[in-house]
Image (cartoon, rainbow, N blue to C red):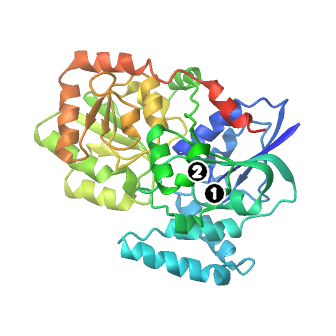
Amino acid sequence: MKKILFVINTLGHAGAETALLELLRCMEPMEYEISLYVLMGQGEMVHELPQNVKLLNKRFDPVSVLSSEGKGGLRKNVLRALFSRGTVIRLFPYIIKNFFAMLKKKQVLLDKLLWRALSDGGERFDARFDLAVAYLEGGSAYYVADHVKADRKAAFIHVDYEKAGYTRELDRVCYLGFDKVFTVSDEVRSAFVNVYPECEDRTEVFHNIVNRERIRSKAQLPGGFRDGYAGVRILSVGRLTVQKAFEVSIDAMKLLKDKGERVRWYVLGDGDQRKSLEEKIKQLGLEEDFLMPGAVDNPYPYMAQADIYVHASRFEGKSIAIQEAQILGKPILVSDCSGNREQVVPEVDGLMCRLTPEGIYCGIMKLIHDEEMRIRLGTEAQKRNAEDEMQIEKLLSMI
């Protein structure tokens, strides 16, 4: 039986984690011995792991890294990693060099600086695997490259590499040691190859596997909106991070309310931008109009009940949330950015807008006042994302 190891940074509610779980569900348990190592040892989605997947972490905390409890655990994990095996002393020149490189670009990303330390401070395993898969950028890629024994190694890229803040210096060009690199879209592939031209011949697109029937079935479960609102409901799903640009959506909502539109916007997700976004909502008097109830275990009833789905972000790889909204037949508005361009054909199965308050406002106004367009776009959106489990053969053919 072939032994496969997957490594991911956390196992919280996010797109890459959702995609990994779907991939694991598609793997035949009688043919492969599958193991998973979660670098940070945290994440609430651990309860959704298929029974045949062996979790290698000696200790695991099933809490969100975005919760106050999870953030406390995260800090402990960081400190433990920094001071184990002399990591902080050994990596000091690396951290200082890359810190000043980020400072020069006026973009200091502490999480990117710490991934190397977290990787080096991770657990070690004597076992040798037929295939080791780093399913996310940063820590998991560094860990598989440096600390896993395997006959073959593969890495997944889920974001526009440069825009997400990664560099060859941060990576220590670790991707040159992978036998295969899989990207979730063509644009993500182009961005990655721009940084690693040496990897062009071994970099291939691997589309996220989505289970249409499972999503539709979960959309029928109890849940969803409970506020009795009778106006137009807008929904967005995503972490409250700089990448998702929710502050721009809040400004767009202000324009909608100033025009007297009967509309309410909901955001399912959590993140480090919550406090600043809540302050902005309060300043603009939108406390009853732009709601952020947090992350939920099952977002699909909300998606099914929403009138419009909006995904206005600064950059993407390939958004699982967009795919899910399409499967549920929602009229979708996306921002014109990398990743999103591959998921929506403007005026055919969705609308595309500039990432400005005015751009988002105009797109939403079109959808609000044209019911026929909403129905047409939603119907066409459902035709996308036909499940393609053959994608998995790209990975398994490595062994």
Q: Secondary structure at mark 2?
A: helix
Residue 191 vertical placement versus 23 (above, below): below
Report how many numbered discs are placed on residues in the image: 2
Work out which quarter of the rendered image holds the N terminus and state it. Answer: top right
Residue 105 in view, yes or no: yes
Quadrant of the image occupied by residue 334: top left
First-in-chain label (1 vs 2): 1
Q: Is residue 197 left or right of residue 39?
A: left
Question: Considering depth in this image, is 323 or 103 the residue closer to the camera?
Answer: 103
- The picture places residue 112, in percent across and down from the top left corner, at 52, 65
Q: Residue at x 39, y 22 (%)?
A: 381
Above or below, comparing residue 265 to residue 219 in the picture: below
Task: Give how far apart the Cα atoms at labels 1 and 2 are.
Answer: 7 Å
Residue 199 tag number: 2
Where is mark 1, residue-wise?
176
Quarter of the image holding residue 366? top left
Quarter placement of the C terminus:
top right
- The answer to whether residue 116 is above or below residue 164 is below
User: Horizontal placement of 54 versus 157: left or right?
Assistant: right
Label 1 element class: helix
Q: Position of residue 202 (x, y in %)?
A: 62, 44
Kindly identify the residue that appears in the image at 22 percent across and 43 percent down.
253
Asked whether residue 140 is in view, the answer is no
Position of residue 29 measured from the top left corner of the image (x, y, whole percent): 81, 31
Residue 223 in the image: above or below residue 142: above
Q: Are marks 1 and 2 in contact (CB under 8 Å)?
A: yes
Residue in view at x 27 percent, y 37 percent = 264
Between residue 338 and residue 224, name the one nearer to us: 338
Instruction: Left or right? Give the position of 313 relative to 283.
Output: right
Residue 342, image x and y in percent?
40, 34
Give me the residue at 69% from left, 79% from top: 83
Query: Tag 1: residue type?
Result: Leu
